[in-house]
Amino acid sequence: MESFQALVLDKVNGEAKIGKREMQLSDLKENDLLIRVAYSSVNYKDALACVPNGNIVKQIPFIPGIDLSGVVVRSKDKRFREGDEILVTGFELGVSHYGGFSEYAWVSANWAVKLPKDLSLKESMILGTAGFTAALSVHELQQCGVLPERGPVLVTGSTGGVGSISIAILSKLGYEVTASTGKLEYESYLYELGASRVILRDELIPEQPRSLDKQIWAGAIDCVGGKALGAILSSTKYAGAVAVSGLTGGIDWTSSIFPFILRGVRLIGIDSVFTPMETRVRVWERLASEFKPAALDSMCTEISLEQIPDQVALVLQGLSRGRTLVKL
């Protein structure tokens, strides 16, 4: 097999640097499935993995990329055959195992999902971890009884990947969506995704926070965390639910027990990394059908391996929007 290209984090003159490199299959550690990668994507976690102080990658050299889709070239597992189209998100990919920013990748068969029939390899990576996290959040809200007729659903961090796709899914399902953002220059983009209302994120945090505030939200998808979370919980309606998946706003928040014991509000932690395979497959099937946003391309920018470092810089500065697709 010919050599291939990958984006590698390595030390150059004693300093960690990321750049494209020619590699051989012998440079990769064998696993169950050898994948010819078609697409990957850039997530916030990837951006952290591409810089030396991101606290994601523990050893270098390393190939980042927590998402990939592609075709099975070799299989040591009877569940998969050569030619199968698969996708992988989460688990150890791009964290402690060489990831998707590479034309070839060995992966565990236990991480692989066969591509749903109504989803292309490209579409699966426009969605990627962000889309899966968004869909898992909507799925969990529905399990808690948060339905369109219950009232508005709040989405924070709405211009990011998880937020953008959450808005598109909720809107398609008939929910009234309020999008919270610190980037009002993207207001028209959020309305195009299906938001019914756009507010500044500062509006979520009152000057004098209360343990219980006016009931506003039937539910919320919080991609940010931080101080706003307590205020969101205090203004969630009776029997509502808040799905939390992000921490860009910080890891600390303050609330009281009142929303939980007086209104029956539920706080749901969303972990898209180690979601059990049965749930993972079910959510991906929903992403390929009733959850699938109508205009995926409109929330996506396509780049090459060489362009990833520039995109990483934008992500870390909070200047990215929607999803970034990597074509291998």
Image (tube, rainbow, N blue to C red):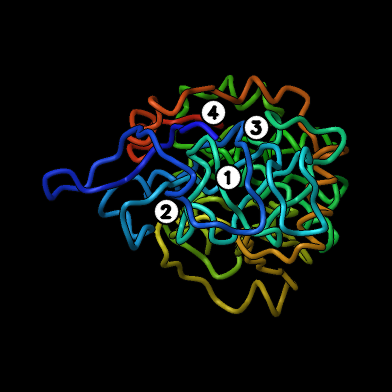
The residue nearer to you, when weighing 131 against 219, is: 131
> Pointers 3 and 4 in contact (CB under 8 A)?
no
Earlier along the polypeptide chain: callout 2 or callout 4?
A: 2
Residue in the picture at 82% in, 38% down? 288
Dot 2: element:
loop
The residue nearer to you, when weighing 4 against 39, is: 4
Amino acid bearing label 1: Asp
Residue in the picture at 59% in, 55% down? 90
Earlier along the polypeptide chain: callout 2 or callout 3?
A: 3
Dot 4: element:
loop
The Cα atoms of the two marked residues, 2 and 3, are separated by 21 Å
> Pointers 2 and 4 in contact (CB under 8 A)?
no
Q: Which residue is mark 3?
A: 197
Q: Which residue is mark 1?
A: 67
> Would residue 102 be visible to someone looking at this image?
yes
Image-based side of 269 in relation to 29, left or right: right
The residue nearer to you, when weighing 55 against 296, is: 55
Name the front one of labels 3 and 4. 4
